[in-house]
């Protein structure tokens, strides 16, 4: 069968190649099954035993075979497996071909396990929800996955409470949280070396944020690809363009038959997500509503203008940073305190509230006893331009 599949080498050379890659009876049986089931197994390089034989025949001078490569990502040198449509794909691409929606997060990812009902789980949810990894944290008291197990009288520390020990970094000589803090070569996260690779899109040698079928992709190109939308060449809808791979993509995921990833769970937009399956705009709405509603989920009519001004920010990520860096406490106080008699109306829906500009210019915080809503709403109207 190998002689018929190759056709350019003498029989004795092919027999020597077969004995080199399949010296045992089990390997010979696997090779015979592979070649009988698929005559093109040597050409596509799958299953692995057929790929090894193809490489051996090429090394012995075969004129009809070429080095097997993954049909999805194009990588060579690794074992290939039978993929969809009878092609040979590497283990990573084959895993993604078998991806299913996770029963917990809903994202289409490789299956790492199943829940009690037999539904598929991705690796993140499987690790997070596995009760064998859950212990009571000695710092916060919650039963969550632990980062450091108890030893020498120290309690378990969960992944949320764990902090790297401080040491003097051997690179920048600053005292910062470091890995290998107990050794003579502690190193902080900023100085830790990161593996780099030539980006498949821009060609720059940078740490990859993702490895797509086209190759490694750096963070700027990764972000630009997730945010790139245009009219699909097949359906005409304004969608993220994903096929063919690379900057020349002109087809959306639905028309290309590819699972949709990085889509907001609230509004459905295909964008780079910010938190918990939400885009930045929906995350801003959730965070603003949470702060201004005192945890009830309903913003009072008196604060509707403030809520609208926050969520109408031109750059939602900047607004989220503004809330996180101190303004969130003021909004939370406004949501909990009753409206005072002299509280003026809320500002118009134009960018961020004036408190953003006030904080950036270093204005003093409202004095004790001042209504927080008045502090937010009573700023001069000219400052509203700062949120555009």
Image: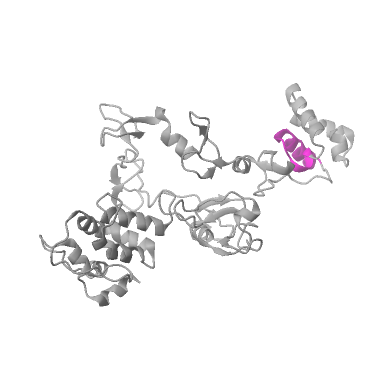
Q: Is residue 59 above or below residue 335?
A: above
Query: Which quadrant of the figure contains the N terminus?
Result: top right
Most extreme residue toward the bottom, as rendered? 382
Residue 147 drawn at (x, y percent): 36, 35
What's drawn in magenta, residue-wise?
A: 41-60
Q: Is residue 53 magenta?
A: yes
Q: Nearer the viewer, residue 34 or 253?
A: 253
Q: Is residue 94 magenta?
A: no
The structure residue drawn at horizontal position 76% and vertical position 22%, both measured from the top left corner, is 25
Query: Which quadrant of the figure contains the C terminus?
Result: bottom left
Where residue 34 sits, quadrant-wise, is top right
Q: State left or right for residue 387 relative to residue 277.
A: left
Magenta segment, principal secondary structure?
helix
Residue 189 drawn at (x, y percent): 37, 49
Residue 225 drawn at (x, y percent): 54, 60
Residue 204 drawn at (x, y percent): 54, 60
Asked if one can make out residue 90 in the rendered structure from this viewpoint, the answer is: yes
Q: How many marks?
A: 0
Q: Is residue 262 above or below residue 181?
A: below
Q: Is residue 358 above or below residue 333?
A: below
Asked if one can make out residue 17 in the rendered structure from this viewpoint, the answer is: no
Q: Is residue 42 above or below residue 225?
A: above
Q: State left or right for residue 93 relative to residue 147.
A: right
Q: Nearer the viewer, residue 278 or 64?
A: 278
Q: Nearer the viewer, residue 268 or 171?
A: 268
Most extreme residue toward the front, as rendered? 301
């Amino acid at each position: 069968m190998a002689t018929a599949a190759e056709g350019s080498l003498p029989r004795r050379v092919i027999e020597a190649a077969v004995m080199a890659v399949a010296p045992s009876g089990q390997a010979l049986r696997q090779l015979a099954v592979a070649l009988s089931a698929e005559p093109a197994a040597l050409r596509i390089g799958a299953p692995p035993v057929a790929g090894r034989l193809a490489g051996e025949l090429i090394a012995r001078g075969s004129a009809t075979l070429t080095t097997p490569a993954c049909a999805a990502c194009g990588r060579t040198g690794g074992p290939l497996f039978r993929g969809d449509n009878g092609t040979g794909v590497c283990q990573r691409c084959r895993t993604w071909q078998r991806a299913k929606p996770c029963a917990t997060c809903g994202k289409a990812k490789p299956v790492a396990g199943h829940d009690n009902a037999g539904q598929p789980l991705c690796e993140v949810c499987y690790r997070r929800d596995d009760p064998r990894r859950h212990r009571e944290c000695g710092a916060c008291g919650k039963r969550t996955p632990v980062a450091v197990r108890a030893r020498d009288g120290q309690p378990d520390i969960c992944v949320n409470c764990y902090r790297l020990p401080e040491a003097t970094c051997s690179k920048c000589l600053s005292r910062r949280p470091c890995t290998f803090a107990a050794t003579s070569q502690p190193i902080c996260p900023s100085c830790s070396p990161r593996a780099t690779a030539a980006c498949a899109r821009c060609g720059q040698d940078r740490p990859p944020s993702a490895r797509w079928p086209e190759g490694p992709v750096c963070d700027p190109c990764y972000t630009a690809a997730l945010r790139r939308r245009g009219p699909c060449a097949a359906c005409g809808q304004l969608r993220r363009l994903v096929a063919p791979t690379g900057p020349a993509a002109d087809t959306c995921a639905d028309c290309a038959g590819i699972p949709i990833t990085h889509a907001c769970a609230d509004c459905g937009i295909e964008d780079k997500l910010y938190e918990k399956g939400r885009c930045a705009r929906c995350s801003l709405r959730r965070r603003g509503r949470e702060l201004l509603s005192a945890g009830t989920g309903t913003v009072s009519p008196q604060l509707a203008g403030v809520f609208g001004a926050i969520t109408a920010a031109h750059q939602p990520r900047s607004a989220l940073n503004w809330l996180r860096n101190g303004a969130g406490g003021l909004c939370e106080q406004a949501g909990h305190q009753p409206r005072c008699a002299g509280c003026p109306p809320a500002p118009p829906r134009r960018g961020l509230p004036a408190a953003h500009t006030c904080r950036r210019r270093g204005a003093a915080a409202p004095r004790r006893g001042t209504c927080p809503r008045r502090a937010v709403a009573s700023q001069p109207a000219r400052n509203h331009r700062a949120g555009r």
